[in-house]
Amino acid sequence: MKKMTTRTTVLMQKQPLKQKQFLVSGSAPAELLSVCRYCSSEAVPVIQVSRGTLIVTNSVCVNGHLSIWKSQSSYNSLPWSNLMTATAIMLSGCNATSVLRMFDHLSVQMFSMRTYNRLQSLYVSPAATMAWDAEQSSLLDQLRGTDVILGGDARCDSPGYSAKYGSYTLMDLQTKKILDFQLIQSNEVKGSTHMELEGLKRALGFLKDYVNIKEVVTDRHSSIKKYMRISQGDKKHLFDVWHVSKGVLKKLEAASKKSGGKDIRPWIKSIVNHIYWISSSCGMDGSVLYKRMKAVVESKFLLTDVPKLSPVYQTYALEVFHSVVNNFAPKSTHFFYSSMLARLCVAALYYNENCNRDRAFTKDGVQCFSLVYPKAKKGKEAVVKSRPSPATYDYVLLIKQAVVSRREHDCSSYSNAAGDVEILQNHFPVSLTQTFEPFQKADLIARHRSRFQR
């Protein structure tokens, strides 16, 4: 008996997580199924069922033999590739609308946007949340009872004062691991500007039961300073140097743009690096320029905050995490609460897995560097940065396993999954439009007038 090859073994896999997917043109299965499997005579295959990525064909030969062929396996009428494709869209951080449009341009049969939203809300989002909960529990069990130095920062889903979501993240600055994040919807607080403080309160309240919070490094948000001083006085509160220097830089640049203030610009870089040195050695006391610079560097708020600058730990790693979040949840795209929460979970899982990657080396053992032109230098200077080793995606398999398990065991039908999700969503804030007065679409259409209509 001929021994089966490794490739044949892969093709014979029945488990959805181990099956490879192939892009096959329509003529290929038609040619394959045009021969009867029973008598090898000519057969005519006809697509009988088409459901997303699944097709079911019936082939009838000249001798009357009927053959049924399915392009993939299903579970309770749900094709596995439908579920795995919806999972892959979220795990890759892609926009579902763009992905489905790409498949349409490629003439690849795919499910609709409505089906994607259903699969995402019933299976993918809950599985991603479960995977993050398991990761977070493991981290906190390792750190239970230890002293930690936390870095905190907020991210809104859109700039300005009209953000719908705000997420606040607390990171262990010694290990660079995300310990907790809180997703706040603007209608849970007085307004979008209050989401940062509320996120910090919730995150600290959650972590206090697991770790001893020794220090907290944040930006200079006024409400956070007050809260830490009054309500968290037992914790040392420090400020991130980059946020302070960024604020000074903006104020100095604004001062240099005023009438007659162009001579301030050459000093800005030095002032940012050596605030006290430039204020004491410039030697222009009494001049208009000196007074403008002095108003910035000797600001009452700045001088109060300088002694609280963090000497060792900074929050730059949180900025890196926020860039990861932007990949999974772009600010230009709207997400519903459950989807936004799930994408934050995926971003946290990716970051925690890859935050401490080793440096990359060639086969000859030479360290790899990348040539970078800093935007601020406008091409006048260049620097090299060490290149990290390739990212890993072990968390993807964990989420896929959770998705399959949820379909096979916990929620084997849409109705069961919908009931389970409804229980989970009871803990979510109500949507922003739920409290609005409803309007009849027909009435609005009747009253609609366009300036292009004469």
Image (cartoon, rainbow, N blue to C red):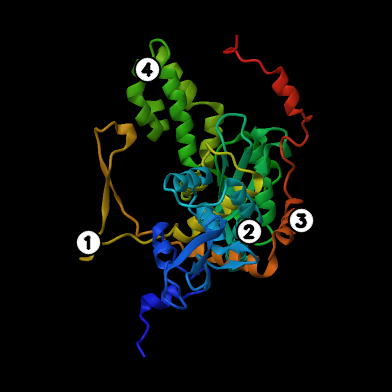
Q: Work out which residue is located at the far front of the displayed protein and give it.
A: 63
Give the secondary structure at mark 4.
loop
Quarter of the image for the C terminus: give it.
Answer: top right
Q: Which residue is mark 3?
A: 423
**What is the C-alpha distance between the residues marked 1 and 3?**
54 Å
**What is the C-alpha distance between the residues marked 3 and 2?**
14 Å
Question: Is label 4 or label 1 in front?
Answer: 1
Question: Is label 2 or label 1 in front?
Answer: 2
Q: Nearer the viewer, residue 176 or 62?
A: 62
The local crowd at label 4, few if under 14, some if 14 to 19, many if 20 or more residues have their Cα within 10 Å, is few
| Residue 123 circle label | 2
Disc with the residue nearer the chain's start (1 vs 3):
1
Question: Is label 3 or label 2 in front?
Answer: 2
Q: Which residue is mark 1?
A: 366
Disc 1 marks which amino acid? Answer: Val
Disc 4 marks which amino acid? Answer: Met
Q: Residue 127: which quarter of the image?
A: bottom right
Q: Give the number of callouts.
A: 4
Q: Residue at x 64, y 69 (%)?
A: 408
Give the secondary structure at mark 2.
helix
| Residue 284 circle label | 4
Q: Work out which residue is located at the far bottom of the displayed protein and give it.
A: 1
